[in-house]
Amino acid sequence: MTTDANVTARVRASFEKQKIMRLLGATLTDVQRGQVEITLPFREELTQQHGFLHAGVVTTILDSACGYAALSVMPEGAGVLSIEFKVNLLAPAKGNTFMARGRVVRAGRTIVVCSGEVVALQNGKPEEGESVATMLATMLVVQDRPGITD
Amino acid sequence: MTTDANVTARVRASFEKQKIMRLLGATLTDVQRGQVEITLPFREELTQQHGFLHAGVVTTILDSACGYAALSVMPEGAGVLSIEFKVNLLAPAKGNTFMARGRVVRAGRTIVVCSGEVVALQNGKPEEGESVATMLATMLVVQDRPGITD
Amino acid sequence: MTTDANVTARVRASFEKQKIMRLLGATLTDVQRGQVEITLPFREELTQQHGFLHAGVVTTILDSACGYAALSVMPEGAGVLSIEFKVNLLAPAKGNTFMARGRVVRAGRTIVVCSGEVVALQNGKPEEGESVATMLATMLVVQDRPGITD
Amino acid sequence: MTTDANVTARVRASFEKQKIMRLLGATLTDVQRGQVEITLPFREELTQQHGFLHAGVVTTILDSACGYAALSVMPEGAGVLSIEFKVNLLAPAKGNTFMARGRVVRAGRTIVVCSGEVVALQNGKPEEGESVATMLATMLVVQDRPGITD
């Protein structure tokens, strides 16, 4: 087990390597042991045909939030890989800002199960946030595989 | 029911409105009634921390391929919305080119179930394509809802 | 919208028609609007090869708990059908008593999304209950289809 | 790797220990390396409120078919545990006989991904079989854990 400062540093360092986050404009806005938040401002380049955020973009920030929540409880030197996830789209992804929160549901030696949620905010009014998607994900603890750390 | 030419035109017109496809660099490479293919060349901007295509990007092209496969069998004027999907990541998404293929498994009046697969190609050698992900998705047939057509 | 007493009566009447519940020995132990609990005592006849409750039995009580949670928020005369669900098995299903709780996450006109959990109790010590499974499910509101009410 | 005769014997021996199969009346009707079939005759005791086979029963035979398909490709001495599965119910489960077929999609050292399908037959006319459900499942290869073999 690592200290909380190490957990944050480790997740942050790995997040910085996810080049897709930069392309989308997503940032890491909170890291705790077992819980991670990623924030994404709306941009037209990220939309599907009706002008909503594409479900795949919603999934991208959910997967990273869940994956890093899982990584935050893994032993040092281990890496995380998504085995699978399911996403329910609860409402059209309309809003100015989207916050994906992932948290660990169950941490085993090999498998970490996480759940995630994306909340859409209108004009930065957090009290009007609406849940637009929920994820249930299975993450693999990868050890001793070259190239797969963090 | 529409003619096959109409099906292709309808899917193509809707795909052109998905701005995220342009940002990722994905193109629509095949449309048939009940089956759609989207192709995405590898770019470093699309990667996760180990240098593979991010699972969320894999999901983005799978979701569009499945959604348009569903739309291709819907009555004219109906729109498609993803209700939910599950993705299994079968292997690290390494390759030069990724092809997502969605097809209709069951088309009902309200619900269309689709399956999808992403194959990774190395240096354009299709014979060495490897399946890197599989999706099982549920799509909603949306009728009479303003703003949701195609 | 119906009164709470009607909600309970409606769910209870439908549950009584689920003959599989009698075969398994499951009973309906709590009904509220948007939330339903089903309880199943352990029996050897319900096990898989390692002596745990079979994942399919876990799923059976989860599906009914989620389905009836969904039904409890539907208009009178509507019926409920499971479109799909995903279950994560979090721990081997060991215990004397299993409690499945389903609750509504999002209720739409056509689609109701529910989540569920199964907790295993040892010797009736609820304080030692362990979560053994979690479900994320999509239910269909069925109207005007003969034979499909409640 | 074991011989095909050993694969069949191993799966059959484990299936015999699944007491739930006897309660439901399900039998193992085909075992090949990477593919397993389980057959279940309709009985009223297995139904939900509309008289169809309960989705949980459909899932039970699918999970065992997928789990044993996975076990059939694992090294001797390993055991199989279901990590998670997703099921889409494609049509009401009406029929006289239900056949669940599971097959391996991808076999890794730790994780085996399987897909499954349930076909409903009317009066034993296989040519009229209808697909009523599809599963996408993730199985864990369990080694060196007491009590978890086969």
Image: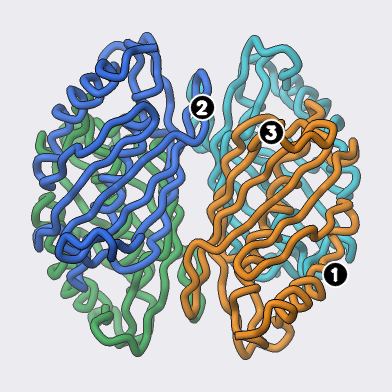
Chain colours: A cyan, B orange, C green, D blue
Q: CA distance from mark 2 to mark 3?
A: 14 Å
Residue closest to the eye, C87 or A146: A146
Element type at marker 3? helix
Residue receiving disc 2:
A111
Which of the chains bears the disc numbered 1?
B
**Residue B1's quadrant in the figure?**
bottom right
Q: CA distance from mark 3 to mark 1?
A: 33 Å
Of tags 3 and 1, the one toward the viewer is: 1
Which of the chains bears the disc numbered 2?
A
| Mark 2 and mark 3 residues within 8 Å of each other at the beta carbon | no
Give the residue displayed 68% in from the left and 21% down from the top: A79
Instruction: Kindly identify which numbered label has been placed on residue B16.
Output: 1
Instruction: Kindly identify which numbered label has been placed on residue A68.
Output: 3
The amino acid pointed to by label 2 is: Ile
Whether labels 3 and 1 belong to a single chain: the reply is no
> Where residue D92 sits: x, y (%)?
30, 68
The amino acid pointed to by label 3 is: Tyr
> Where residue D110 sits: x, y (%)?
50, 21
